[in-house]
Amino acid sequence: MLDNLRSYYNSSYYTKMTNDVTGQGNCSKVSQVDSNKRMPNIKVFAGSSNPNLAKRICDRLGIEVGKSTTKKFSNQETCVEIGESVRGEDVFIIQSGCGQINDNIMELLIMINACKIASAARVTAVIPVFPYARQDKKDKSRAPISAKLVANMLSVAGADHIITMDLHASQIQGFFDIPVDNLFAEPAVVKWIMDNIPDWKNAIIVSPDAGGAKRVTSIADRLNVDFALIHKERVRANEVQSMVLVGDVTNRIAILVDDMADTCGTFCLAAQKLHEAGAKKVYAICTHGIFSGNAPTKINNSNFEAVVVTNTIPQEEKMKECSRIQLIDISMMLSEAIRRTHNGESVSYLFKNMPLI
């Protein structure tokens, strides 16, 4: 034992430590090396809303999903336990605003706060579908701006950064005082069109409402095809009174593009309108497939060749109900955004390009 102690005190490690304490030696160089070694590692945790997407993201990053446990007490309060150390780590928490939305928001807030008070270096919330995004403005008296409230809660919980995809209104980014990266599914949509529609050069990209005109013109420009617009007048939410098509779709392949499909009432009416106007085939592509209520039945009874959505929301059950629903995997875009954020690289490349991973 005495021999072991002598060898320790005579070692270079002990000499360096003594020099650091006494002020001798090149302390600045040692501290610089140590700080480089202490760069935070990445930890990715998954909420309960979309575990398959989180698994795909982690597989692409070459890491395991972080250990965490979510349960409910008898009074329905949510309890989250983080099962591994996050001290000094770069933490990413993946949680979509879908399914049991209110429970999932609370679960995300608790996970963020748990990691923050456990001394995580940075906590990034990866929210493929931002909840309450359609309540983004005061469109009538005493209406709440719930998207702003969600933004405030995320900031107060301790989130340092937000990564999301195809916000319903891009101005929601301004509700935050922390960095927000709003990714676009557009590169994946363009790739799907070119890979799966043989006669895509004879296509016309159609927006089901005026609000999506910018999204549609961007895709049409990248494909070098024409675009059209459907103007609709609503009686109330999810109920359309009339539709007017602006553009010529005669003998063309019409591709409806929107950010989300909820009850699909508007989509199905738009498909009928396009067929009546002379379109050969009608496709629908949207980023977030919510498919509330009997939406799958409406799609089965519609004129669509296919309704294509991304996996920001789990679609396994809906695809069993409706064979026309097809899926675009966007895990490569989210995983690349996480990798670039962790390494301090620019994310803007992903706004126009698909990562090759």
Image: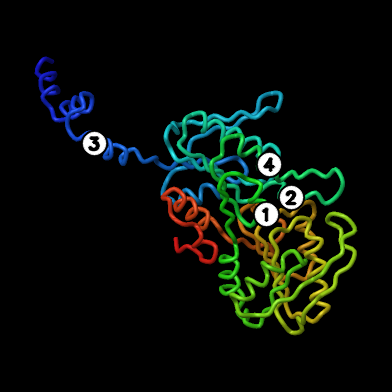
Q: Looking at the picture, which amino acid does disc 1 mark?
A: Gln
> Upstream in the sequence, badge 1 or badge 2?
2
Labelled disc at residue 171: 1
Q: Which residue is mark 2?
A: 136
Mark 4, residue position = 150
Q: Quadrant of the C terminus?
A: bottom left
In this view, the residue in front, 62 or 97, is 97
Nearer the observer: mark 4 or 3; the answer is 3
Whether the residues at callouts 1 and 2 have beta carbons within 8 Å, the answer is: yes
Residue neighbourhood size for the residue with mark 3, other residues' Cα within 10 Å, grouped as few (<14), some (14–19), many (≥20): few
Q: Are marks 2 and 4 in contact (CB under 8 Å)?
A: no
- Callout 3, which amino acid? Val
Type of amino acid at the residue the image marks with label 2:
Asp
Q: Which residue is mark 3?
A: 30
Whether residue 202 is visible: yes
User: Residue placed at 56% from the left, 73% from the top?
Assistant: 195
